[in-house]
Image: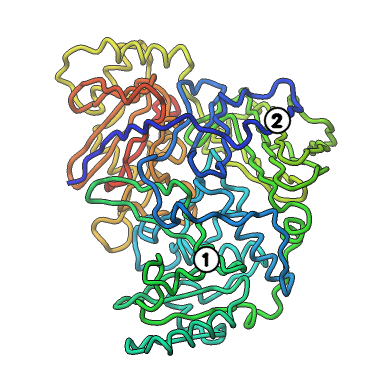
């Protein structure tokens, strides 16, 4: 039986790559880095960060939430050194270089790109439209300390080709790659009785054939699936590997180095290697560009190759995922640009003032709705630039409105950050009252939603009456398809307006196309506010919590106040439940 547990993630302080790089600030009233929780994946791979950031307007008691430091990857031996990205390399074709540079840009996001198998995304493996591959949900610059993306081996390879060429390859998942003979330049079916001399000859032919950008594909013995990897030259492979969510122990698995990792080409032919090809059914070299001969490198990829290699970019928001901004409140956006090149770069940073907002401050130049900066960043240093906007007083935004800011360009590279949901939320004073009411909660016979409403009443904070937790879940998750267990998020529910943005999900919840990027994998402390109610269902049992603030929750089943640790690095492990949702009553 799966049980909800609060996993206390006592990690060392996050060490941003930005630290010690001679940061130079452009905007005097930028948000403090300690408030926004800004981090960059560390080249030593010791640090992790997810969903960090602090909302300025009413969403208090937030902080940096970090994946489990105890879940370390074994894919890359400690003795292996990653290649120096600043080393000059030669490629036979521009297409090869484009693929390698894009692949390395994904690798640079490290802990912000995690492994997730197909089941975690679609909930219904009979629906191929929900497969992680052929979605291209994440560009490298969409991944940041405020947004962790998920991929798998085939999806990583697909994304590299999609990002480099805007190419939608039809045959993509590993089983299809195995039969895509029109893209094969090498193929071997393993008989099992190859002599050592035969193996050496086959391996040499493989090495003589493989080129940067090729897909190395194998099919697992006794299965119809396998593994796909990208060869990047110099005897190196980049691939997505990891461990899926463990439903038996209700434990998420966070790869400390991120899912995209290096392998040596030698390892696939070594019995001690992670991916031992001779233990599989078949292996192939897949070269998609021999089929897609008219593929063209995108203009953005050309810029990435020529001018922006090893430049690490994040765009962050003062309101992280799960938080809300009210009408008339301000949002601050912050660019973090680290120059990993060997010389000073001189680049333009530009953005568009988001719709339904009014520009407040921060830009060097304002031309209509375009704002921009021209900045020089010395080698090894980081530039932090911020601007602030104010949300318009438009009541229509309460009807599921978002503030989108996805038009930024940094040196010609598109950069996005998560949209900010517009909605009411408790004031800081009301949140403090909720915290005080929880701290003084005595013995009670009430349970579930009824106890949550009692806490609100004790705090003197008025909310609409809520239904029993069973009725709430039944209303918010409607049946999906013909299966008994699968559910779909019901945007027509009368309680839809009280769901904290993106804060719903569960093992049996199928993500509709309309909400394909919305469902969360788990609830993080930085995403919830005092007074939020977490309702979880497993089979016919319910578990409810009220976030009390200050990293504490009230177990609404027992009435006990639980301390989730001395830091805010606490993860409520929810995704193992059939359905879960965070209710923010003030939003209605």
Residue displayed at 48% across by 50% down = 258
**Residue 443, quarter of picture:** top left
Seen from the viewer's position, the closer of residues 394 and 43 is: 43
Q: Residue at 49% across / 38% down in the picture?
A: 49
Q: Few, some or many C-alpha atoms within 10 Å of disc 1 (few <14, some 14-19, many ≥20)?
A: many
From this view, report whether residue 435 is shown above or below residue 392. above
Which-is-in-front pick, marks 2 and 1? 2
User: Residue 371: image x %, image y %?
Assistant: 79, 36
Residue on which disc 2 sits: 23
For the residue labelled by badge 1, is the local secondary structure a helix, a strand or a loop? loop
- The correct choice, above or below, for 199 with respect to 56 in the image is below
Q: Name which residue lies at 42% across and 57% down.
A: 75
Mark 2 to mark 1 CA distance (whole Å): 38 Å
Q: Position of residue 38 (x, y in %)?
A: 58, 33
Identify which residue is drawn at 30% across, 22% down.
563
Residue 560 screen position, x and y as percent: 21, 21
Q: Secondary structure at mark 2?
A: loop
Q: Decide: few, some or many residues near mark 2? Use Cα within 10 Å; few <14, some 14-19, many ≥20.
A: some
176 left or right of 451 in image: right
Judging by the rendered image, the residue that carries numbered circle 1 is: 134
Query: Which quadrant: the C terminus?
Result: top left
């Amino acid at each position: 039986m799966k049980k909800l547990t609060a996993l206390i993630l006592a990690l060392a302080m996050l060490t941003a790559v930005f630290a010690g790089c001679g940061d130079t600030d452009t905007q005097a009233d930028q948000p403090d880095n300690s408030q926004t929780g800004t981090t960059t994946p560390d080249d030593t791979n010791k640090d992790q960060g997810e969903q960090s950031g602090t909302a300025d307007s009413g969403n208090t008691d937030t902080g940096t939430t970090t994946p489990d430091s105890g879940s370390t990857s074994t894919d890359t031996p400690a003795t292996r050194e990653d290649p120096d990205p600043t080393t000059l390399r030669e490629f036979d074709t521009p297409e090869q270089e484009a693929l390698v540079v894009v692949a390395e840009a994904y690798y640079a996001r490290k802990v912000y790109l995690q492994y997730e198998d197909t089941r975690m995304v679609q909930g219904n493996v009979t629906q191929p439209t929900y497969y992680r591959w052929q979605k291209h949900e994440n560009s490298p610059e969409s991944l940041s300390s405020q947004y962790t993306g998920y991929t798998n081996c085939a999806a990583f390879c697909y994304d590299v080709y999609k990002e480099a060429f805007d190419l939608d390859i039809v045959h993509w998942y590993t089983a299809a790659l195995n039969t895509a003979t029109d893209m094969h330049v090498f193929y071997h079916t393993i008989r099992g009785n190859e002599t050592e001399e035969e193996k050496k000859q086959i391996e040499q032919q493989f090495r003589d054939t493989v080129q940067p950008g090729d897909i190395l594909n194998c099919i697992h013995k006794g299965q119809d699936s396998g593994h796909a990897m990208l060869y990047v030259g110099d005897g190196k492979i980049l691939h997505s590997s990891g461990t899926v969510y463990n439903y038996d122990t209700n434990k998420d698995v966070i790869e400390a180095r991120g899912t995209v990792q290096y392998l040596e080409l030698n390892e696939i032919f070594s019995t001690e290697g992670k991916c031992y090809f001779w233990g599989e059914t078949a292996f192939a070299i897949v070269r998609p560009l021999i089929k897609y001969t008219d593929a063209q490198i995108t203009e953005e990829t050309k810029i990435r190759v020529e001018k922006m290699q090893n430049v690490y970019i994040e765009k962050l928001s003062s309101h992280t995922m799960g938080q809300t901004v009210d009408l008339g409140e301000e949002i601050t956006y912050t660019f973090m640009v680290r120059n990993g090149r060997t010389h000073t770069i001189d680049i333009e940073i530009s953005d568009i003032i988001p719709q339904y907002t009014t520009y407040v401050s921060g830009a060097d130049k304002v031309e209509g709705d375009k704002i921009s900066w021209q900045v020089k960043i010395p080698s090894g240093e980081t530039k932090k630039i911020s601007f602030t906007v104010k949300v318009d007083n438009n009541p229509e935004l309460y009807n599921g409105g978002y503030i989108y800011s996805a038009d930024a360009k940094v040196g010609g590279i598109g950069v996005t950050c998560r949209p900010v949901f517009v909605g009411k939320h408790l004031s800081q004073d009301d949140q403090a009252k909720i915290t005080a009411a929880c701290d003084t909660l005595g013995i009670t016979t009430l349970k579930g939603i009824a106890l949550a409403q009692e806490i609100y009443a004790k705090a003197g904070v008025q909310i609409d009456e809520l239904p029993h937790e069973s009725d709430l879940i039944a209303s918010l998750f409607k049946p999906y398809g013909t299966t008994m267990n699968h559910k779909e998020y019901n945007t027509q529910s009368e309680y839809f307006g009280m769901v904290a943005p993106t804060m719903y999900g569960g093992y049996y919840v199928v993500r509709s196309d309309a909400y394909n990027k919305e469902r969360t994998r788990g609830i993080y402390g930085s995403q919830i506010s005092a007074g939020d109610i977490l309702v979880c269902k497993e089979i016919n049992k319910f578990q409810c919590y009220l976030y009390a603030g200050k990293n504490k929750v009230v177990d609404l089943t027992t009435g006990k106040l639980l301390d989730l640790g001395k830091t805010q690095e606490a993860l409520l492990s929810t995704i193992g439940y059939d359905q879960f949702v965070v209710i923010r009553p003030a939003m209605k």
